[in-house]
Image (cartoon, rainbow, N blue to C red):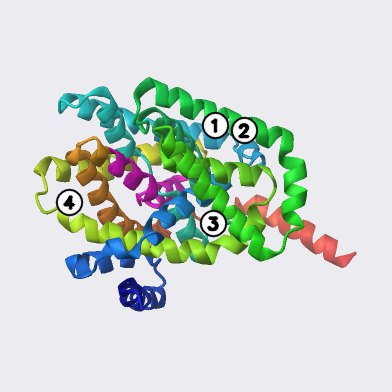
Amino acid sequence: MHPSVLDFAFAAALLAAAAVVVHRCRFPALPAYLLVGLGVGTRLDVASLEPLPSLGLLLLLFSVGLEFGPDRLAALSGRVLRAGGWDALGLLPGLAAGLLLGLDFKAAVMLAGVLYVSSSAVIAKLIIDLRRAAEPESEVVLGVLVFEDLVIAVLLALVGSRGGPLALLASVGLVGAYLLAAHYFSPRLAAAMEALPDEPMLLLGAAFTAGTAMLFHAVGASEGIGAFLAGVIAAGMGLRERILGLFTPVRDLAVAFFFLTVGVGALALLADLQATAVWLALAALVGKLPLDYLAGAAAALGLRRRLLTALYLIPRGEFNLVLGALALREAQGLISQVAVLLVLITIPLGAVAIRFGPAWTAGLRPPPRRLPAAVAAAEGVAEASQLSR
């Protein structure tokens, strides 16, 4: 038996135990996976777990891309776009901070993205698990997350290339070619895919996602953009629901190992933690709250739901780690530290805030509408008259 099987069994058992504990408390499991990684540290050979962690990141970005079908984009209302605009102002302080710290423009853009973007995967899962999807603030939050992901997808295309302008042009050309092919061939492909049994559908989807990511990597672009684009195309073919049903168990397993390895890697990355990274992470956490409160106001939410909007957008996650990995590749250790620190702090904190936010803000509910005595009496007479007929 290969030694990696033992590592897999050990890691899976720890992750399962952590997931059981947090689910009993009605919390999402992702923070627990990070803590497991921090706990096992160097006692686990994470390299032996590949390709599960890398596949987990790709499938996570693929799932985010699934939210960008034409139906979802068309559903972005004007108030959601206004809210997203306020939220996107969070890029400016990060860009300014990066330039003031002496980073080059590309690194400053990476830092701005790390400080700005919230986690679609974590927040959406929390909202669904806690059965809050029908609440007005949840609609706004999910719309803002779509807006953020679009912004970060563009930003990744700009900073994720490893070969300079030529790689950027190649990635733009690939995106155009994929979208053009999807436009002309998706009806026939969708019909053929729908006719497939589940097993070939799952395998073809995995091959398409990983193959697209590898192709983008080969031209010097970000493989994350490739996985994201694969999800966009699958959603545009009308395959979102079926693919989610097939991919979710595989994705959840791989994502658990991805966050485990992030926790393990964080130990080494944070061993020589810079004070500047701590201050930047805290500034990002606190500084985004008023912007997201104003985003709720722009979406015409009341006071309580504006506060909930700000609380719901606390968690950072997948795109922060992608940008942190890109920064590490560019020898920008400070940005990587900020990214990992934000994820480690905000996922547990955000989980608590989303879980208990409605209870904390319950006293801010608008009072019941009280009618003047004369109006109430008139309505009572009218109701009695209707009953007597």
Name the residue type under label 3: Pro
Tell me the element at label 4: helix
- Residue behind mark 3: 368
Q: Are the residues at dot 2 and dot 3 in contact (C-beta closer than 8 Å)?
A: no
- Residue behind mark 2: 179
- Residue behind mark 4: 269
Measure how far apart labels 1 and 3 are at the Cα level. 52 Å
129 part of magenta stretch: no
The image quarter containing residue 188 is top right
Q: Residue furthest front?
A: 1
Tell me the element at label 2: helix
| Residue 73, horizontal then vertical, whole percent | 61, 38
Q: Residue furthest right?
A: 389
In this view, the mark in front (2 or 3): 2
Horizontally, is 147 left or right of 161 in the view? right
| Residue 252, horizontal then vertical, whole percent | 46, 64
Mark 2 crowd level (few <14, some 14–19, many ≥20, 10 Å Cα): some
Task: Mark 2 or mark 4: name the one nearer the start of the chain.
Answer: 2
Task: Mark 3 or mark 4: name the one nearer the start of the chain.
Answer: 4
Name the residue type under label 1: Val
Above or below, comparing residue 254 to residue 374 in the picture = below
Measure how far apart labels 3 and 4 are at the Cα level. 53 Å
